[in-house]
Amino acid sequence: MVFIVIFLVLAIGGRWACSAICPLGIIQEVIFQIPFLKKLLQLPYEKYLRKIKYIIFFALLFFIPIVFLPNKENWREAFLFIKVFGFTTIFILSLFIYRPFCKYFCPFGVCLGFFQKISPFRYKVESSCNRCGLCKRKCKMGITPYESPNHMECIRCGACLKGCPRNAIRRRENE
């Protein structure tokens, strides 16, 4: 019951929780700040890589209750390997890529992304927008805010709001 209440509270904000309170996201951002050779905001085949999290989401949704829960003890070593290998990989990727887990693997972000369009934390593009692209360059998630300000991938970090010289992107007031 507690999980359902927490999920509903988080869902109201959409993916705002990803930027504000997700501990893994915060760790990835701290690691990304470490000076390193080259930082990548987008990878080749980005749109295909972003689909991995949807595959993971649906796999978890359907296969976890069927396969893993009845005989959880048999999977202990596999889960340990997945955790150690997974976290190590994510932390290494975080040196080069902004929030790789959030972009490519997070199934919870998929859930919260479905609520972006109804969240009270939505963004709105004003008519004063001239589509100069500065907001897109500021967006570390690789979104084009003036085309889709409430995109499912947006974590509501506010970088696009700060990057717009015309203040054409705003937080939408409840209408």
Image: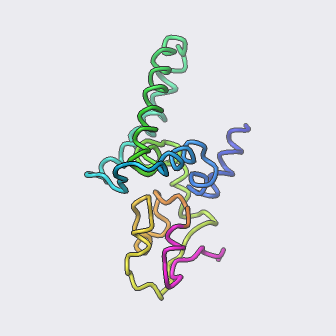
Residue located at (53% from left, 73% from top)? 161
Q: Position of residue 59 (x, y in %)?
A: 42, 34
Q: Is residue 173 above or below residue 27?
A: below
Q: In this orientation, which residue lies closer to the viewer: 59 or 32?
A: 32
Residue located at (40% from left, 85% from top)? 130
Determine which quarter of the picture holds residue 6. Answer: top right
Residue located at (55% from left, 51% from top)? 112
Residue located at (32% from left, 47% from top)? 49
Task: Using residue 84 as the reference point, say whether residue 2 is left or right of it.
Answer: right
Q: In this orientation, which residue lies closer to the viewer: 35 or 43?
A: 35
Membership of 72 in magenta stretch: no
Q: Is residue 43 above or below residue 120?
A: above
Q: In this orientation, which residue lies closer to the viewer: 2 or 96?
A: 96
Membership of 164 in magenta stretch: yes
Colour convention: rainbow
Q: Which quarter of the rendering shows the N terminus?
A: top right
Q: Residue furthest left?
A: 44
Q: How many marks?
A: 0
Determine which quarter of the picture holds residue 174. Answer: bottom right
Q: Position of residue 114 (x, y in %)?
A: 51, 54
Q: Which quarter of the rendering shows the C terminus?
A: bottom right
Q: Position of residue 90 (x, y in %)?
A: 44, 38
Task: Using residue 22 as the reference point, say whether residue 78 is left or right of it.
Answer: left
Q: Residue furthest bottom?
A: 128
Q: In this orientation, which residue lies closer to the viewer: 54 or 48?
A: 48
Q: Position of residue 28 (x, y in %)?
A: 51, 45
Which region is colored magenta?
Answer: 159-175
